Image: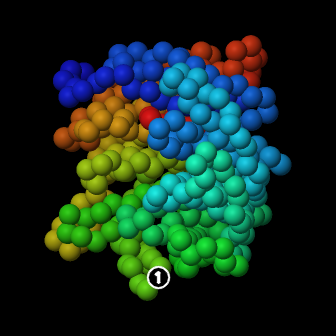
Amino acid sequence: MTTQVHSNVGLKKLILGTQDQILIINFDGTKFTIAGRYTKPDWNPCWMLFKEPNLLYAIDSMPDVGEVNLFKLASFDKLVLISSGKGSWGGAHIEFNADKTRIVGSCYGSGMVDLWDVSATDGVPRVIMSSAVPGQVSPGQKRHHPHQAVLDPTGRHFIVPDLAGDKLLVINDGEGVRSNIYSNVVDVPIGVGPRHVAFITSAYGPHFLVMVAELSNEVFLYEAYYTGNTIDLIEVDRKSSYGIWEPKDPSVAVAAELVVAKNQRDIYVSNRFTGEKEDHIAHFHFRENGSFPYLEFIGLTPTMGLRPRTFCLSKDRMQEFVFVGNEVGESGLVAFERNPFTGHIDSTPVATISNEELNTPGISEDMINGPQFVFQI
């Protein structure tokens, strides 16, 4: 392992979502410490948003619930529940609009997309409307599964990947309540299962969209064309999320998280159910050879566990750490060093904390399940 001199480690504060609880984790560059936790039975906070200075929104993925909870972060070590808003059940993801007055909620379980108003002084969430995903589902699917909503670089549009319909939905922000909130529906290849997306802005000006396909274990690159009041997307490249290798059993392997670094070059994707002793994160570079954009596979880094549903890059200027949540295995939360110049993730962990420590106190051993969500505030 090459020792990396970090520009400014400081104390980093992470928020984790696991079954029945949210945890506040401190990371000092060498170890994790549990600073606080909020526990609630029959609850699954699977995605969260932080709004300065101290508000935290969490969406619940439990069936027949449909809540977005608002917490106040007191002294940065304690969560206090302020309110709960009722929306569609089976939530998967929430995303702010540009000025953080609205939230788009993607509800995987119910197949709905919710629009929330959070413009009040106290930030209390109020659902404005719920909209069904249009069109037919793909063969073998029973209902639409919107999995995420991502704001585009202009701050005017959201992209919502529908895993079961093999579609990328475009929503325009700021147009109010309408019977049809979708300004465009872009079809992707049948059966690939679009899960998460992220934008890249080229050094030459154009915007691109990267998409991870959960079911086909592929990474797609689209060029974004702004036409009228919407976005159109044209595929320009795709690669296996395993690079030059293949999963041992493609019928069970599923890709998960997708993160693009601040440098707009490094792309990371987590692979689950690989059939290996440890699952891994794939690293790609976004490249432009003249006017020809493409994805270059760089390598794989084991995650010290299995089912890495979630990971994030640290928020320091150079993004020198990667925080990975493994749902299965002894190492529930792992910190790896990231070389900011090459994007390489060192396979030797800087810090780990076990899933047993992270889970709700008193939970039976057979119920232990690792983080579903991790991010730094």
**Crowdedness near tag 1: few (<14), some (14–19) or many (≥20) residues, C-alpha within 10 Å:** few
Q: Amino acid at mark 1?
A: Asn
The residue shown at (77%, 51%) is 86
The residue shown at (75%, 56%) is 88
Q: Nearer the viewer, residue 219 or 338?
A: 338
Q: Nearer the viewer, residue 279 or 313?
A: 313
Q: Position of residue 361 (x, y in %)?
A: 70, 15
Q: Quadrant of residue 237?
A: bottom left
Q: Nearer the viewer, residue 118 or 16?
A: 118
Q: Reply above or below: 355 against 125.
A: above
Q: Reply above or below: 232 against 207.
A: below
Number of marks in the rendered image: 1
Quarter of the image with the N terminus is top left
Helix, strand, or loop for circle 1? loop
The residue shown at (61%, 64%) is 162
Q: Quadrant of residue 140?
A: bottom right
Residue of label 1: 229
The residue shown at (53%, 71%) is 174
**Left or right of residue 6: residue 186:** right
Q: Which residue extends farthest front?
A: 121
Q: Which residue extends farthest left?
A: 290
Q: Position of residue 309 (x, y in %)?
A: 55, 40
**Left or right of residue 135: residue 226:** left
